Image (cartoon, rainbow, N blue to C red):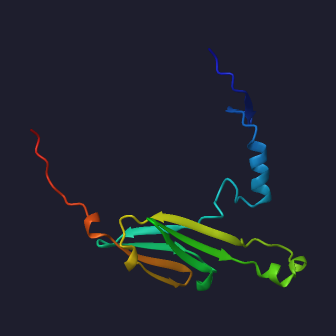
């Protein structure tokens, strides 16, 4: 039979499925500057490159001090946690600001390190970029081999 999903016209050109939460999501995006539903405040951008015998993880953490970045290993999970505190909240001069766009809060990402020699991870933080050199486990490197068909 027919699908009973309600539709509404969008721009008068096409019919889009009705989403009762669409207006609420649009309101949140306008109020919070696109952080909800768009970019994630709790995450930061990372690049991971294969260096042959190790991986290089580079995470963009501009504006953080080294003391505010924490690396925690729990089992096969590496968690990078960074926290930026608002200076205007600490000083109590929040009434003097005309416009605030910089974000403050906790940011964290977790990574699977089951194929890494965790006791040999080296970390450095310079110019807003956290770099982790993570050596691969020896048995983690797969051997290439040819299989015969019987």
Of 31 and 120, the residue lying toward us: 120
In this rendering, would 76 be left or right of 92?
Answer: left
Q: Is residue 127 above or below residue 12?
A: below
Q: Position of residue 48 (x, y in %)?
A: 43, 68
Q: Residue at x 42, y 66 (%)?
A: 113
Quarter assignment of residue 142: bottom left
Q: Residue at x 54, y 71 (%)?
A: 80
Q: Residue at x 71, y 58 (%)?
A: 34
Q: Position of residue 36 (x, y in %)?
A: 70, 56
Q: Residue at x 52, y 73 (%)?
A: 72
Q: How many marks?
A: 0
In this rendering, would 141 be left or right of 149?
Answer: right
Most extreme residue toward the front, as rendered?
75
Quarter assignment of residue 52: bottom left
Screen quadrant of the C terminus: top left
Of 57 and 78, the residue lying toward us: 78
């Amino acid at each position: 039979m027919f699908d009973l999903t309600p539709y509404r016209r969008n721009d008068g050109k096409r019919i889009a499925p009705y989403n009762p939460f669409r207006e609420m999501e649009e309101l949140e995006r306008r109020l919070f500057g696109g952080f909800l539903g768009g970019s994630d405040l709790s995450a930061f951008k990372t690049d991971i490159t294969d260096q042959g015998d190790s991986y290089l993880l580079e995470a963009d953490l501009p504006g953080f001090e080294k003391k505010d970045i924490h690396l925690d290993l729990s089992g096969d999970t590496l968690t990078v946690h960074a926290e930026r505190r608002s200076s205007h909240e600490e000083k109590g001069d929040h009434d003097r600001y005309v416009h605030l766009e910089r974000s403050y809060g906790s940011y964290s990402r977790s990574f699977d390190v089951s194929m890494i020699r965790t006791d040999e991870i080296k970390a450095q933080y310079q110019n807003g970029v956290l770099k982790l050199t993570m050596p691969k486990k020896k048995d983690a490197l797969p051997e290439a081999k040819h299989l015969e068909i019987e």
